[in-house]
Amino acid sequence: MSAPAKDAENDVSREGTGVRAPGRARIADRTLRTDRWWLQPLLTVLGLATFIVYATVRAFVRTAYWVPDYHYLTPFYSPCVSTSCVAGSSHFGHWFGAFPSWLPLGALVLPFLLGFRLTCYYYRKAYYRSVWFSPPACAVAEPHARYSGETRLPLIIQNVHRYFFYVATIVSLVNTYDAIMAFRSPSGFGFGLGNIIIVANVVLLWAYTLSCHSCRHVTGGRLKHFSKHPVRYWVWTKVSKLNTRHMALAWTTLGTLVLTDLYVMLVSSGAIADLRFVG
């Protein structure tokens, strides 16, 4: 590289990129927008923070997560495979001994589910804009001088999203099994309001998981001729339609997870009685 080119590159590095790049208009104001552009990032932060606080507390309290009469198990504790789990809640047996008090009983899968959400294409957009302000809104300058993209640490880790997708699919199967096991009562088969909530949550979790961009790539990616793969093309078209609702499902499933856990907690603690339809 010639000396003038190196000097120019150094100048760009010093001055920054994006709105601070050489040749861009020097506007002192962060933005000229007069609308409430900050409202969407604020609501996103509040929504994510609410879920994180609630889920963190519930993951560590180790109480009111299992209803023995109806086999209701909250998704925050599934699968429960430690000897620390209350009797009956370990649908897949005990794989580990007693967990220390600082370790969540759902620790086997919680890190993978957290990784799946954190690296999700929609959630990236959500917290990049609302937490990192990169950028917070259209036509609003971000505070960062430079941005290297997802090509180096730590953001290069986002590229493992496809592997978290595989684990999330397995966890969805586990949650489906939990939902089936919940159709019980002291007299045999039965179902109540809790079953409706648990099944609805599982269905929406499947919809969110399958609407993932990685799932769309798995079903139809790298195909040069759809005509030679009619089955994969059919699956790809269905996943693509679901993919357009990925953002809505990302938020909806946060709500249904909280609702399901809250309902199981209230029934398990005796605060309310499950509304039974059969059994």
Image (cartoon, rainbow, N blue to C red):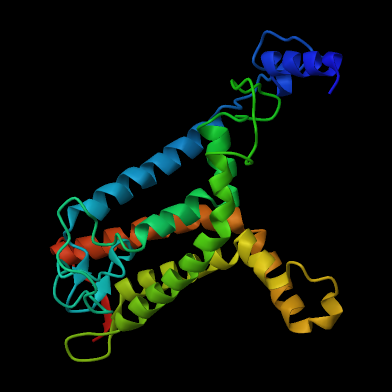
Of residues 93 and 62, the one nearer the viewer is 93
> Which residue, as the protein is rendered here, is positioned at the far front?
2
In the rendered image, residue 11, in percent from the top left (x then y), is placed at: 74, 13
Residue 89: quarter of image? bottom left
Quadrant (top left, top right, bottom left, bottom right) of the C terminus = bottom left
Q: Which residue is at a point 69% across and 30% down the rendered structure image?
A: 138
Of residues 24 and 246, the one nearer the viewer is 24
In the rendered image, residue 265, in percent from the top left (x then y), is placed at: 22, 61
In the depicted structure, whether residue 145 falls above or below residue 242: above
Q: Which residue is at a point 16% across and 86% down the rendered structure image?
A: 186
Q: Which residue is at a point 55% across and 52% down the rendered structure image?
A: 120
Residue 263 in view of the camera: yes
The mark tally for this picture is 0
In the rendered image, residue 135, in percent from the top left (x then y), is placed at: 63, 29
Of residues 72 and 274, the one nearer the viewer is 72
Using residue 6 as the reference point, say whether residue 249 is left or right of it. Answer: left
Residue 248 in view of the camera: no
Residue 29: quarter of image? top right
Of residues 200 and 275, the one nearer the viewer is 200
Using residue 187 as the reference point, say whether residue 27 is left or right of it. Answer: right
Quadrant (top left, top right, bottom left, bottom right) of the N terminus = top right
In the rendered image, residue 83, in percent from the top left (x then y), is placed at: 15, 70
Q: Which residue is at a point 26% across and 85% down the rendered structure image?
A: 184
In the depicted structure, whether residue 31 falls above or below residue 127: above
